[in-house]
Image (cartoon, grey):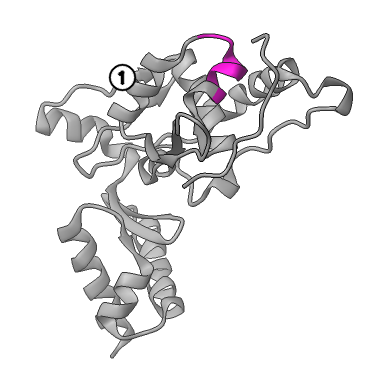
Amino acid sequence: MEATDIENIIESILFVSGEPVALSRLAAVLGISGFDVETAANRLRDRYSFDRRGIRLVKMDDAIQLCSSPEYADYIRLALETRKPPQLSQPALEVLAIIAYFQPVTRVYIEQIRGVDSAYTVGLLIDRKLIEPCGRLAVPGRPIVYRTTPAFLRTFGLESLQELPELPEVTNSDDSITGIQNAIQEIQNQFEGLGVRDQGSGDESYEVSGDEDYEEPGKVE
């Protein structure tokens, strides 16, 4: 199969899907290796970017998706008569940062770090598809644990969680819950500075405007 044919087929599948498609799935459909799929996807991404096209190909961990170009977001909103997406509040950004850096985590774990009830904020982030339940902790009560979603990566323009700003180190002399709180506070400015892209796939995108002892998350089932 010619390289152009591979690119065209990938482009067609991504266009019709409107959602992230795993590289392994594309490789199985095309009968080629994952490496060849990723190479073809990179060529498509570079071409869209070089030609300043109205769409972009974005990679999120082991999946790829077609999205609208962020610079044309205002025109898309006008044409489709949609409102500008809501900004994430500071509490929402704080909870999102905790989940992004320490996932998978329980709501109790989040509240240990923040020192306040976070039920509403966790629910809000689930509604906005930035986090999702991913199992239950193997402890009494079996609390739900949460992780970030591909929409989180897409919204902040990340290919993987490894591209997050480095979390400041918590010193041995300050390894209490207060130390974790201070570290989270330090990374929030970096977290806000991450590029936010308009997703353009039918999903919303978002702009960024404890006395208890700290406990490590347990085993997740």
Which region shows up in magenta? 109-116
What type of secondary structure mainly makes up the magenta span?
helix
Q: Residue furthest bottom?
A: 1
> Where 7 sits versus 114, above or below?
below
Give percent across and percent down for residue 93: 48, 22
Between 126 and 207, the one lying in front of the other is 126
Asked if residue 123 shows in the view, the reply is: yes
| Dot 1: element | loop
> Where 26 sits versus 167, above or below?
below
Q: Residue at horizontal 18%, vertical 35%?
A: 76
Give percent across and percent down for residue 130: 37, 34
Q: Residue at horizontal 19%, vertical 67%?
A: 12
Instruction: Give the total number of marks visible in the rendering.
Output: 1
Q: Is residue 200 magenta?
A: no
Query: In the rendered image, which quarter contains the N terminus?
Result: bottom left
Q: Where is mark 1, residue-wise?
A: 86
* Amino acid at the residue labelled 1: Pro
